[in-house]
Structure formats: structure tokens, C-alpha cells
Amino acid sequence: MLTAAAGGLAWNLIDGFTRTEARYVASTLAARALALVLAVHDPWREIEDSPLCNCSSDIPYRCEDPSHPYYERVRGDPRFASLLQLPPHRTETYAALMHALSDQITRGHRTSGQRFAGGYHLLERLDDAVRGERFLCREISMMLAELVGATGGYARLVALLSQEGSGHVVTELWVEDAGAVGRWVVFDPDYDVWFSSVNGIPLSALDLHRMALERRFDAIVAHPGGSARASWTGSESKRLLLDHYAHLSFGTQANWISTDLPSRHPRRHPQAREDLWIDDHPTLPPLYYRALVGDEARMYFTPCRPWLAPEAAGGAALR
């Protein structure tokens, strides 16, 4: 009888260890193995990080210098030249940029495989899009982050994970609307949509996480851009997307143009040390929460550029 009970327990453990869990365990082991190899010999050791763009907390957020030569090329590109003249740090500006980008991208798996380094950024991806290449949410979010960076704005990637293990990637942008306190706001360029509360306040990933957790879907207003190429299909897309906000992981390195490292390089994804896995859903094993951030407010800092004069650094005080 004890043997049968032990066998049943073992089966339940094996059956509960889904492919999602296996994928994350394998990814974690691979990342640690690569870190050990690079500790011995790192061909990219001489590449220097840009300065921190966070003057209000200990989160190591890094952004690009708007004067970077690549951003000069972006600002001179006729596909976005007029939009890049709009006031920076505004919700309507970023919504317009997201929509213009979304209209030029076909969604789907790349025919040539994903590329995250080697001088392959916004303009190169757009040239590939003209030739029929397709892109997934992560690459589209990176493109929006780079486009906003060219305006002098602040951006970061946020990886989402549903309770069922389905993933998605969106962009959070620092917004300073007229008369409002600065805040991080989610823009989803894959679906060409951003969200607000019913009283018009743009929402962050953490806002969406909390509201989705409480099943307050009617309190969330979707603002789709209407791109014919976007993945948005109305209320069905809204519920599907919000289910992905069960767990959040914030990228802290948004300077991948100047630090053009391979996609799996530990310095490319330093958020592995500062993941905000909000453990409100105990259905996923705690193995993934090795860097759980207990105080969510730490991730909602006011960004700044320390190499600028204080009056030009930007970033009103957060609530």
C-alpha cells in the first residue's frame, strides 16, 4: 500500500512538471553554464555599459544616450521624421509612434530565425519587413523601445507570463502627460494597443497585473490603434492579453544598441538578478522566483540621465 502511495505521488510530481517548467529549468541551467564559461573568457569584456538612468532607486536600469549615432539615423529616416517632431514623453505621441510602427510589421515567426545582436536594430528590421520578413512580440517591442529612444524617451521591455505558461513581451514607456505625474505606461506594439483606467489614467504593467488578478476587467479600457496588421481582435484579445499579466519580469538594460552583446550574454539581460515575479499566483513552482522583489515600487522609479544637467534630465517625481 505504501508502495502504491509512493508511486502515485511520484506520478503526480512527474505529471505536474509540464513542458513549461522544463523549459524554464533548462533555460536557467543554460544561462548559469554560459556565465561560468564567460567568467573564464569573455570576448565582449571590453564593451562598456552606458551610465545608469535611474537616480531614485537601486534598480540598475540603463538606457541609450539620445545622441547615439544610430538614433541620428532613426531621426533622419523619412518613415518617422514627422512623428519624431511631436512632443516627447506624451501618451499620444507614443501611441502614434506605436501605430506607425505596427502598420509596417507583419506578425509571425521569422523565416530566418530571430536575431538580437550584431548591428541588427530598428532600421534593419524595417528594411527586412519591406522584404516580407515577419516578427514576434519581443522584436516588435524592441523596435518600439528604440524608436522612443530616438525621441529622448525612456523605455524598457516587460516579459509577461500567464498561469498556463504562455508568454508575451510588451514595452513600458515613461510618460509625462501635461498636468500629470510621470509614470511608466504599457504599450503593446504587437497588438497596437495601450490601456487606461475608466477615468483615463494610462496603466502600467503592475496596474494591469493587480486589476487582472482582481478580475476587474471592466475597469480597464483598451485603446487599440486600429492597425490592420496588428494582432488585436477586440474583447477576445483584451481578455487573452490581461491573462498574461499574472507574472511580470522587467528588463533593466535598454542600451542594447551601444552594448551590442549576444542575446544570451548575462550582461544583456541583467534583469535576471532583479526579476519582479509577483507571487500572487502560487500555481507556478517557486523555483522561478529566485530573485523575487518584495517591494514592487522599487521597479517604478523615476528615470533620469545623470550625464545631463538636472533641469534637462527629465522625470517628474513618482506618486
Image (spheres, rainbow, N blue to C red):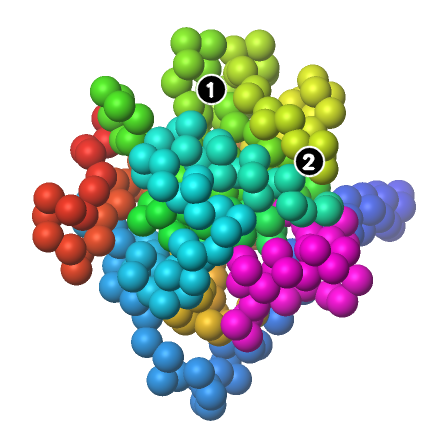
Q: Nearer the viewer, mark 2 or mark 1?
A: 2
Residue 174 in sight from this viewpoint: no
Q: Which mark is residue 196?
A: 1
Q: Nearer the viewer, residue 72 or 53?
A: 72
Secondary structure state at the residue bearing disc 1: strand
The prevailing secondary structure element of the residues shown in magenta is: loop
Specify the amino acid type for callout 2: Ala
Q: Which residue corresponds to mark 2? A: 230
Q: Residue furthest left?
A: 310
Q: Would residue 126 be counted in the magenta stretch? A: yes
- Chain part drawn in magenta: 108-137
Residue 298 in sight from this viewpoint: yes
Q: Position of residue 290 (x, y in %)?
A: 48, 53
The residue drawn where x is 49% and y is 39% is: 97
The residue drawn where x is 35% and y is 31% is: 90
Q: Position of residue 149 (x, y in %)?
A: 38, 51
Please determine whether, in this image, residue 98 is positioned above or below residue 257: above
Specify the amino acid type for callout 1: Ser
Q: Earlier in the sequence, mark 2 or mark 1?
A: 1
Circle 1 packing at 10 Å, graded few (<14), some (14-19), many (20+), is some
